[in-house]
Amino acid sequence: MAERKVYTRTGDDGTTGLLYGGRVAKDGPGPRAYGATDEVVSSLGVARAETERDGELDVLLVRLQRELFVVGAELATEPEHRDRLTDGVTRVTAAMVDDLEPVIDDVSARFDPPQEFVLPGETRLAAALDVARTVIRRAERDVVAAVNEGWLEEESFVVPYLNRLADLVYTLARWQEGRYRPARRD
């Protein structure tokens, strides 16, 4: 088996390779946006490390981490190569955005919403989810900048996906705090 090294040295000049070819500056709009998305994946991993393995939340967080790879793939593709993307695999779809809403609704029905500003830190898991939520919001801002700079098309579903994801992760954090009594299911 041939030796494979982690380092390539190709990025030593300040550029990075993209999906489907091409190189751009590491501080360009695409790399900033997919770099922030990569941070979201890791942040959700910190939260996941606090969950019960194969439990409901663990399974959901794995799903979200995998969906964020789709976000990253779209952001790591130059505009002229976007025709090579595959819906739901390397391009975010409207269905991916829509599929988050029933999860938000389901989790929201499990507790009464807070009536005041939330101070993160009730539990380690909730705090990790709150950190992940703030990283998602930063990624969302970076993606909006990428759209404004022409890196990503306005028709892309990446911004709505991240917006809905932040709402979901906020809801998950409140659910995991456990201090709100369960909402009535009438």
Image (cartoon, rainbow, N blue to C red):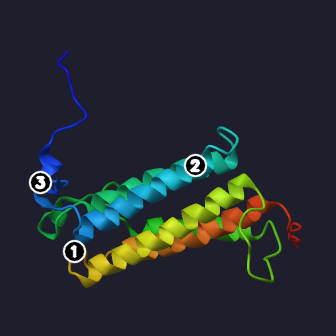
Tell me the residue that label 1 is attached to.
Answer: 151
Residue under the image location 65 percent in, 39 percent down: 54
From the viewer's perspective, is residue 90 above or below residue 149? above
* Residue 122 pos. (x, y %): 78, 61
Tell me the residue that label 3 is attached to.
Answer: 13
Q: In which quarter of the image is residue 179?
A: bottom right
The residue mark sitting in front, 3 or 1, is 3
Q: How many marks?
A: 3
Q: How far apart are marks 1 and 2 (CA)?
A: 30 Å
Mark 1 or mark 2: whose residue is earlier in sequence? 2
* Residue 106 pos. (x, y %): 71, 66
The residue mark sitting in front, 2 or 3, is 3
Tell me the residue that label 2 is attached to.
Answer: 46
Q: Distance between the residues labelled 2 and 3?
A: 32 Å
* Residue 181 pos. (x, y %): 89, 67
Quadrant containing the C terminus is bottom right
* Residue 1 pos. (x, y %): 20, 15
Let me know if residue 49 appears in the view.
yes
Let me know if residue 155 appears in the view.
no
- Identity, as a three-letter code, of the amino acid under mark 2: Val
Residue under the image location 66 percent in, 38 percent down: 53
From the viewer's perspective, is residue 38 above or below residue 5? below
The residue mark sitting in front, 1 or 2, is 2
Mark 3 or mark 1: whose residue is earlier in sequence? 3
Residue under the image location 19 percent in, 21 percent down: 3
Disc 3, SS: helix
> How many residues crowd around disc 3 within 10 Å: few (fewer than 14), some, or many (20 or more)?
few
81 relative position to 72: left or right: left
- Identity, as a three-letter code, of the amino acid under mark 3: Asp
Q: Quadrant of residue 29?
A: bottom left
Disc 2, SS: helix
From the viewer's perspective, is residue 106 above or below residue 2? below
